[in-house]
Amino acid sequence: MQLDFAKKTAIVNEKTFVWDANTLFYDEKGSPITITADRLTKGTVVSIEATWIKKKPLVIKKLSLLSK
C-alpha cells in the first residue's frame, strides 16, 4: 500500500483510490474518525467502499479500519 496525503491517494493491490470531502472514515468500533497519517499506515487492514468511474481512480465513499 502506498499513501500520499498531499494528493489524497492510496494505492492498494495495484488500484488507485482517492478520497474527498464526502469520504467517511471509521475506526475499528465503527465510530467516525478524522484520518491522519498515524491512523492509516502501511500494513493497516481496511475495508473500502468506493465508486468507480471509467478511466478514473476509484473514489472512496467509506473507509473502515479493521482490527487485526
Image: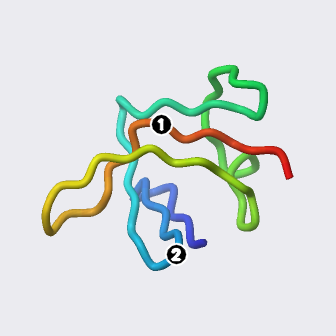
Identify which amino acid the numbered label 2 is placed on: Asn
Percent x, y of residue 55: 15, 69
Q: Residue furthest top?
A: 31
**Does residue 57 appear to the left or right of 33 in the view shown?**
left
**Label 1 residue SS:** strand
Q: How is the image coloured?
A: rainbow
Number of labels in the image equals: 2
- CA neighbours of label 2 inside 10 A, class few (<14), some (14 to 19), many (20+): few
In the rendered structure, the answer to whether residue 19 lies left or right of residue 56 reads right
Residue 62's disc number: 1
| Residue 16, image x, y percentages | 39, 68
Residue 28: which quarter of the image?
A: top right
Report if the CB atoms under discs 2 and 1 are less than 8 Å apart.
Answer: no
35 vs 53, left or right, is right
Q: Earlier in the sequence, mark 2 or mark 1?
A: 2
Q: Position of residue 11 (x, y in %)?
A: 48, 70
Closest to the observer: 19 or 65? 65
Q: CA distance from mark 2 to mark 1?
A: 18 Å
Give coordinates of residue 61: x percent, y percent. Answer: 39, 37
User: Which residue is located at x 51 percent, y 56 percent?
Assistant: 5
Q: Residue at x 83, y 45 (%)?
A: 67
Q: According to the image, label 2 marks what residue?
A: 13
Residue beneath the point at 78% across and 26% down: 29
User: Which amino acid type is marked by label 1?
Assistant: Lys
**Residue plotted at (25% across, 54% down):** 52
- In the picture, the quarter occupied by the N terminus is bottom right
Residue at the farthest bottom position: 14
Which residue occupies the extreme left position in the image? 54
Dot 2 falls on a residue whose secondary structure is loop
Give above or below for 13 relative to 36: below
